[in-house]
Image: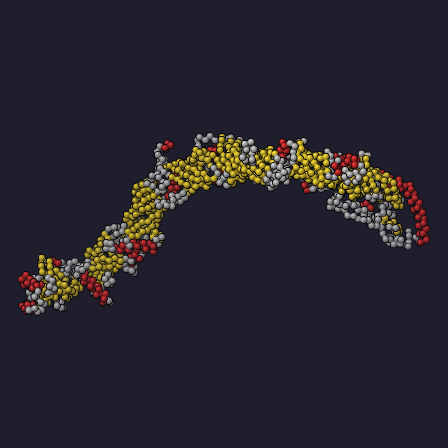
Amino acid sequence: MEDSNGAEASGDYVLLPVDESGEGETFPARPLSTPRLEADSHHGRLDSKDMFHTDFTDPDLYGAEGDKAGLLTATAAEEKKVFCGMNKSRANWCMSVTFLLFVTLSLVGTFVIGPALARKEISNTDVTFLKVNMTHPEGDTADPTQPMTFLMSADLLITNVAPLDGDLAAMDVDVLFNHKVVGTVAMPKMSVTAGKDNHRSIVNQKFTIKDLEAWDEFSAALLQESVVPWKLDATATVSAKVMGLPMSFSGVPFKKTVPMQCFDGLQKVRMAVFDMGQSTEDQVTMAMAVCVWNPSYIALEPLGDLFFAVDYQGDFMGNVTAFDAKMHVTTTEQSPQLCQQYGATGWNAISMTGNLDPDSHEKADELVSRYLGGLDSNVTARALPHASTISMFNMALQGVELAAVLAGDDAPLVTSMDFNHVMITPVDDDGLVMTLNASVGMTNPLGVNSPLRIDTIDVTSGMLYDRGDGAGPGMVGTVYSGATNLGPVDDDGTVHGQWVSGSDDVEMETDCTMTFDDKGAFLTTFTKDLIALDMLELQLDGSTACDAYCEALGYDLDIHDIPVVLPNDYPTPPLAPVLVPGMSGLSDVEIITYSLPSDVPDGTDGCTSLCGVYLEVNARIGNPSPFGMVIGTLNAIMQTADGVTLGHVSVGPDFTLVPGDNFVTLSGTMAPAATDLDAAADFMSTYLSNIAQTAVVVGTDAGEDNTVQWIHDVVDGLELATTFPGAGDDLELMTDITIDTMDMALTADADPVMSATLEARMNLPEEVGFPLDVISSGMKFQMVDEGVACANATVAPVPVDYVAGTNGGQITLSTGDMTLSVLDEDAMSSLVTDLLVTTSKTVTMQGTCSPLASTNMGELSMSDVPFEGEIVLLGFNNFENPPMTMPSIDIASGETTVLNLVISAEVTNPSNVAPSMGTVKLDLFDPVTSYSLGYAVIDDFSLAASTTTTFTGVSAVFVMPTDDDTHAEACRVFMSNYVSGTDQAVELRGPTDGSGTDIALLQPALSQFSSTTTMPGLTEKLLVSATMHLPSAKDFALCLLDQTCEVPTELHVQNPMSADITMSSAACDIFVCKTINGDTCDEYFDDGAVGLYTPETDWVEEIPGNTPADDYVTFQARNVEMGNLWNAAALQALWDASFGGTALIRLEGTMDIAGRLQ
């Protein structure tokens, strides 16, 4: 059969034409279809769990599909009718000749050339094992009836194949070592290509151990030697094509010596993990992972459970077991992650666990100390006699020692330190002692289930501090704790310390020492920052030793030289620095009590005069830091917030600054320099103002007896800032304020002007006992009425009369004239109103004073010291007690309805306020009828305080209404009473329409003013006397006959008023004097009136103004109508008139009088 290319089909193979160009090569035939098994390319190694197979379709080994020269290729070729370009008959002849030739050559190749070529090819071929994997061991050396086998997989490199390609049939191969057959392994069929590197694999071929002794020698050599020669011995069957004809040759010797790179004694071992954290109460468990370098191409998987003894410096520490161990990573394969730190390839991780059960406690202590101290230690894992649970490896492991370096633990024993209480006591310039209580964080390397009892601890550590200034950490000093018991001690010396399970704190209390090489210079720096800052970071760099009872081991561990490094970035997580709470500037300073009791005597400490005042302060100093210090004496200056020195104080000689609250007494003097008196005055002013203020105590030295220089340096500049309290809420700087006199002048176009003389008690706090003398004082104040500031005023500094007393004294000062600036007109008007109409008025006087005081410190010019006090102003009470009086009233002129009066008035001022109110108009009312009578105007209504002021020439107007008869009648009656000499009440009212004054502040007050006084009647009577003359005979006869008769009578009249008056009628009863005493009558008859003056009408008499009584005006004689004469009074009158010439009579009745404008 021919294919489409003219090829002849021959069974499963087709012979293609030879490339006539001579450029091609002859390639072996390739089967039509070859099984293509998948290789695990992910692992890249031969593994007992993986199947590795060679791809026989690889074109590099067997040629590409397109190659032409002599390539046998599987095909389904079709027959062709033409062969070699000949017709069928010639082709048949040609084929016959060819067949004969083929047969001849085949016989020669088969029996002569083929076997020779096969032996030579096998002999010359080189076989190299690239990897050998021994897995699935079976059998037990203790049971010889069971075969000892394992599965062997290998990667092979077959080279130097020549001259023919061929197939090597499956065969059993003996493996020999030291001329002994170790065992037999089945080799599968494989094909090789001449002139090529042939990579082949065998997979899971059973290796049967034939000689256990030989195997033990062989396997031991694998572990201990670097190179071990394997000898392979078998009889092979080879198939090849000779002269193009397939041939098979059996009985061909197969003997190869193959050098194998082996384990070389497992010389490179690293301890990757060592952990005792899974220990229990009964056992100290060692868990370790070692990384073992495999320099070979041999993988052993599994090795079984391996058993080792761990030695340190030749002493047994305990047994460990590696469960399910294997050496499966060869020299070219990737190391597991755990071992990557030692090399990228060739390292195997083997985990082991066991218990620490040392023969030598001392060596165990040393090993544990080195481990916990981070120091590397050489340890050896020595295979035990029963080294493996897989018996075929047991003898091979005998004598195997894994020498490893146990790296120091990166998990420190001491993980933190917190200072609970530290008290520093200076010793000298090279050291100090510290009483220390600290919580030390410790990690138990045995874990949480195997507690350690830490009985003693001994720490030696440098204490470093980094200020953050770029200079790096500086050495504060080196601390030595000495061996410190962490619990009570029995009589037998047993210490019952503190248990640590996992990570716990132990409390350490001890007396430490600290030394330094710089005379305490950097200690001073640290201490100053400790005082100033809220938090500091300390660094510790040293070591510790401890005695720890291990319950699991049942004895005490002596652990020593364990590093104490804080902070430490190496562990995971990193260890933090030691945080020390600072003293926060010692800002929590509270003054509890204080006193300035007395003056410092002249001559004290060389001072001649003005030596200041004593000062004593009891204070609480809060120290938030756990650090404290024995200072002894603290000398300091006292300053204001602005840094001005006020005096000197000291505390000691046993001052100790402890953590928490410190109660101290600072004693000294307040004696500012002359240039700082203003600052001292400001300080005292603020103090007396009850305003808390900052005071700063600044350290200067630690006392002249202290010889430790660094403690002086610490104290120098130490600041204790506090709030100096004010004088106290209960202090009233000014009490018992009284006004002796106060003048207040009100004007229409300006604020009131006031002056006053004040007296007050000046109070000083009871804490201030030193004497002072107030020389002068200025003042600013407000007058407050019912919570409203009415007005304020400023008093320029004026002399003060000061009488010293206990905690203060009595002051008197006169303000001089000052403007009272009105702040609230309504409130001020209300104040003026209350003063005018009430008996007293209480107002609050509040403000500040600025006294100049003479003290033993010097003259202190204080300023703006507040005061507040109530003062009582005596009110005017409407001038009713006593009431106003009118000593004189004069009718100066008049009109038809108006009389112009001129009066004098006396006003008694009951108040200590002397007002000046300008022109004041007061309305006059009849209190009986409430009718208006007129008004009076006082041009300058100014009153002296607490005395009577007389006003003369006061204008008044009497107004007769014309539109109201009743009102007019009341006015006539009022004036008649006046003329008649009758005293009568009159009410003075301020006009409600504001017309009483043009001063706005006074208008509301005046509108409420009402005062009743007595208006005296006219004291000089108009009628001086009257003369009755003897009637005519007719009238006399009529009188005798007891009939009405007329008796002529003359009136003698005076006019004491300035205005002329006229009299036009009279109706007056006549009463006769019974007892005449000169010009007066001592007694009148009680018989009643004897007659009427006068029944005559239409008469008018004029009386000029200011007509005196001794120059009176005599009216024309007018008849008096008399009735019954037969009574004693009438007869006496007639008798007197007839024989005495006149009769003394009294007229009672009315006369019509009118004023007339002059």
Left or right for 157, reference 488? right
| In this picture, residue 34 sits left or right of residue 411 | right
Left or right: where does residue 1067 sit relative to residue 451? Answer: left
Residue at 56% in and 34% down: 495
Q: How is the image coloured?
A: secondary structure
Quadrant assignment, res 557: top right
Q: Is residue 167 visible?
A: yes
Q: Nearer the viewer, residue 825 or 167?
A: 167
Q: Residue furthest front?
A: 491
Residue pictured at 48% horizontal, 38% vertical: 659
Q: Residue at (29%, 60%) from the top-left corner? A: 992
Give the quadrant of residue 1002. Answer: bottom left
Q: Position of residue 765 (x, y in %)?
A: 36, 42
Percent across and percent down for residue 83 are 91, 52
Residue in front for this viewpoint, 526 or 581: 581
How far from the left and from the top, in percent, is residue 616? Answer: 39, 37
Q: Pinpoint residue 249: horizontal percent, then vertical percent.
A: 88, 42
- Camera-side residue of 231 and 884: 231
Give the tally of numbered discs.
Answer: 0
Q: Quadrant of the C terminus?
A: bottom left
Q: Nearer the viewer, residue 304 or 146?
A: 146
Q: In the rendered image, is residue 720 in sight?
A: no
Query: Taking 202 as reference, is 1097 above or below it?
Result: below
